[in-house]
Amino acid sequence: VRAAPAAAAYGRLAAEALIHGLPGPLSLPVEALRVGILHETSPSPEALGTALETALREAGLLIAERVAHAPRTGEWAALVQRLRAASVNVLIHAASEGDAAAMLRALAEAGWRPRVVMGAGPAWGLLDLARAVEPALEGVYALDMPPIESAPGWAQGAAAFAQAYQRRWGSPPRSGLSFASFVGARTVLAQGPDRAALGALDLPEGTLANGWGWRLDERGQNSRARPVLLQWQAGRPVTVFPATAAAAVPV
């Protein structure tokens, strides 16, 4: 059983956000976007890179570059130069926390930054990342699991979870992954856990504490788990798209 979103959901969200969610902040028509996809060669980032390219191409967006790099690569200067030479104005990076921080530092050292920098995956919503690279993370977007700062009417259990986490650990939740893990585990354990009961469970989106629902497909994937687009604003990850989940507007 997989409670969290599949890679394909991240690709679909990226396409929807670039076409419908960010025209104002981008100040560019969709046809002027030149997307660069950068990802580690490890399994999860590789899967995200493939899903992103597939969904963006299907949506008619231009992929100017797709570049894979080894984890903890030392080739950042060359990678940034390649993206810059391709006139990339939207950069999406799927990577671990260490490479996410290294990429942001490389952009700063090169004195160049695309119009939009967007992470993909749970490394990009970590408070630890903000501590490592502030203020370079300010304004960066991320395709991630719903953070605590999502619309209260949508992620109805966010405040209660954050308070319980603070009491237990003496610090705020590190990311939306903590919240998602709680939601998934609670749902599974409430059923026994029993595979047949989990397969029969039918909860519409918005039912669970972080805004997700529950319906397993034939592969055991929860088809009602959706990532959101967050943005780092004033040192915090805040949902900005889709509108039903947003706690702020993109800036």
Image: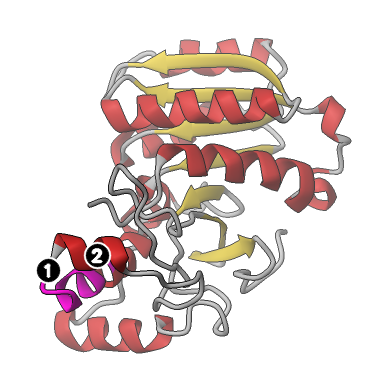
Q: How is the image coloured?
A: secondary structure
Q: Residue 234 versus residue 96: which sits nearer the camera?
A: 96
Residue range of the region highlighted in magenta in the rendering: 184-192
Q: Residue at x 85, y 27 (%)?
A: 31
Decide: is 103 above or below 153.
above
In this rendering, the count of numbered labels is 2
Q: Amino acid at mark 2?
A: Leu
Pointer 1 with pointer 2, Cβ within 8 A? yes
Position of 107 with respect to 217 (left or right) is right
- Magenta span includes 89: no
Q: Position of residue 92 (x, y in %)?
A: 55, 33
Q: Which mark is residue 198?
A: 2
Report which residue position mark 1 lands on. Answer: 193
Q: Specify few, some or many for label 2: CA neighbours under 10 Å numbering under 14, 14-19, or 20 or more.
A: many
Position of 139 with respect to 182 (left or right) is right
* The image quarter in which residue 121 lies: top left
Q: Amino acid at mark 1?
A: Pro
Q: Residue 150 versus residue 197: which sits nearer the camera?
A: 197
Q: Position of residue 187 (x, y in %)?
A: 25, 72
Residue 119 appears in the picture as rendered: no
Q: Residue at x 32, y 19 (%)?
A: 41
**Tag 2 secondary structure:** helix
Decide: is 116 above or below 51.
below
